[in-house]
Image (spheres, rainbow, N blue to C red):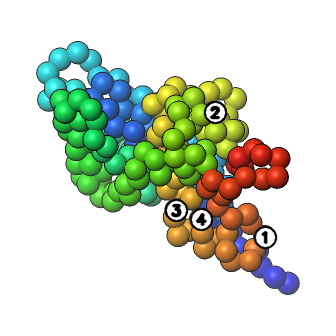
Amino acid sequence: MVEKKPAVTLRILGIDPGSRVTGYGVIDVVGVKPCYVASGCIRTAEGALEQRLAQIYAGLSEVVGLHRPAQVAIERVFMAKNPDSALKLGQARGAALVCMANHGLSLAEYAARQIKQAVTGQGGADKEQVQHMVTAILQLSATPQADAADALAIALTHAYNSRVYNSHANSGNGLPAAPSRGRRRSTGRWRL
């Protein structure tokens, strides 16, 4: 009798940092199937930047305490046209990095284009396309807010790039490989 191995579950937290709104998304990868756990937005109150950064830190700390992720992924900072916006984004990202470090969690970083490519098959996809694909991949009953959808997309990107996901997909156990990034089916639709 062949003993069936239990599916490995990996919990991933995705973070889409912002000085006003920081999105978070938590997924479980069971075998190779990504499953929705939670998502939302940490909205900071008006006030001094240092107070907003403290709110981001506290909000993410609460998310980590509640969901206990094994791995964390965050969007890499891109150069914005407005230097002041880029600086504030970097500071919000810094609050997230320190929070994860204080919880003993390491981070993987992904560029926005890489995230869009992994989830939609197009590096230049817009926010609505990302929301649509996240909703479809995770089989959600409603479309998440844009920042939460971006965070879920970051978590999905990390899942598709994780060694656990790829080792299961390539083990010959009949599980599907990671979704194709950019290849089309003969129907012309992007694979999920």
* Cα distance in 3D space between marks 3 and 1: 19 Å
Q: Earlier in the sequence, mark 3 or mark 2?
A: 2
**Which residue sits at x=44%, y=37%?**
24
**Which residue sits at x=67%, y=44%?**
137
Q: Residue furthest right?
A: 1
Q: Earlier in the sequence, mark 3 or mark 1?
A: 3
Pointer 4: residues within 10 angstroms few (<14), some, or many (20+)? Answer: many
Q: Earlier in the sequence, mark 1 or mark 4?
A: 4
Secondary structure state at the residue bearing disc 3: helix
**In which quadrant of the rendered image does the N terminus lie?**
bottom right
Q: Residue furthest bottom?
A: 1
Residue to which mark 1 is pinned:
174
* 79 lies above or below 6: above
Residue 165's disc is 4
Number of callouts:
4
Residue to which mark 2 is pinned:
132
Residue to which mark 3 is pinned:
161
Measuring from the top left, give residue 87's x and y in whole percent.
19, 36
* Cα distance in 3D space between marks 1 and 4: 13 Å
Q: 53 left or right of 39?
A: left
